[in-house]
Image (tube, grey):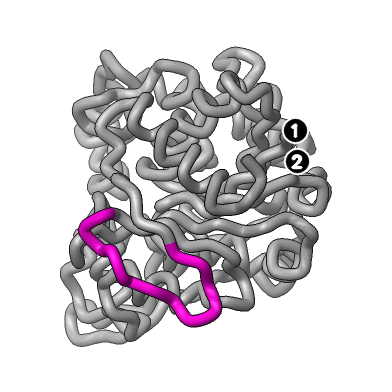
Amino acid sequence: MRITVLTGGIGGARFLAGVRAYARKAGADVTAVVNVGDDVRMHGLQICPDLDSVMYTLGGAHDPERGWGRVGETWTIKDELAAYGAEPTWFGLGDKDVATHLVRTTMLTAGYPLSQVTAALCDRWRPGVTMLPATDDRLETHVVVDVDGERKAIHFQEWWVRYRGNVPTHRFVFVGADAAKPAPGVLEAIGGADVVLIAPSNPVVSIAPILAVPGIREAVADGPAPVVGVSPIIGGSPVRGMADKCLATVGVEVTAQGVGALYGADLLDGWLVDTTDQGADVPGVTTRAAPLWMTDEEATAKMVEEAIELSGKE
């Protein structure tokens, strides 16, 4: 079996750990198509938060308490940058994490595309899945906000890390998406999959940027594989992160049914919701309820098994 997962964020990384556990038992191959809309250049370094969250989580190096970054991280570089007054001061780079960004930036500067750089970084971490950025091209999520009496667009990282989303927010813009192309292997992974899973990631800023790359949404919606989404909303609240703020901005109800309808029957064949949300049906989509709390890898693998059964490809 070949499983392709559209994913992003910390929740998506944790979900992939369950997909990998399921795949090992089922003898399946897994490809993760990862969001790059969060990518940003800081202090001259190219930072790819979602790719790194997946890589560190599956490589056993993530910090389980913070949920992001490296375990055992230190912050000497951050402190030194602050002592120089180097902006932005609101975004912290851990010492171990800087090494990843240095290697990535050096390779990108030398002309290697992000997909090849990601593969090279994964040689160290051995995530157990094939990791592909959605695109090798520039794609950044910007947010139109009101700050200090001015309406302007800021990078998603500034919106979330600096302001925690607590500023008047009007819309999200995927800068560069129109001109981007799917990274090598992405369309092949979708078209050659036996099942496509949409992780319980933020639908607005983790999954939508992937689908905004021309050709990807069409490949998912029109491909031969059944598509099953897993709800990131349980009982009217996001499992983690800022999905509620994002959904409110785009006018979508913060419910499992609201997110399922946002994806729609043109994209989804199946929609997996938590038992709390039993009956959160989406028109034209087969819905099933199962426990969705990712308390540990075993529980997450059981979620994945439910999603695969829902697809009819078990």
Give the vertical position of 8 relative to 263 (above or below): above
Q: Position of residue 216 (x, y in %)?
A: 71, 63
Instruction: Give the amino acid type for the residue marked by disc 2 in the picture.
Output: Pro
Q: Residues within 10 Å of mark 2 (few under 14, many from 20)?
A: some
Residue at image point 30% right, 37% down: 294
- Asked if residue 279 lies in the magenta stretch, the reply is yes
Residue 149 vs residue 196, the one in the foreground: 196
Q: Are marks 1 and 2 in contact (CB under 8 Å)?
A: yes
**Circle 1 sits on which residue?**
116
Residue 239 vs residue 132, the one in the foreground: 239
The quarter of the picture where the N terminus appears is top right
The quarter of the picture where the C terminus appears is top right
**Circle 2 sits on which residue?**
113
SS assignment for the magenta stretch, majority: loop
Instruction: Give the side of residue 147 with respect to residue 27, left or right.
Output: left
Q: Classify residue 102 by image quadrant.
A: top right
Residue 257 vs residue 254, the one in the foreground: 257
Instruction: Give the side of residue 162 with respect to residue 202, left or right.
Output: left
Instruction: Give the side of residue 24 with respect to residue 280, left or right.
Output: right
Give the vertical position of 45 relative to 264 (above or below): above
Q: Classify residue 105 by image quadrant.
A: top right
* SS under mark 2: loop
Read off the magenta span: 275-287
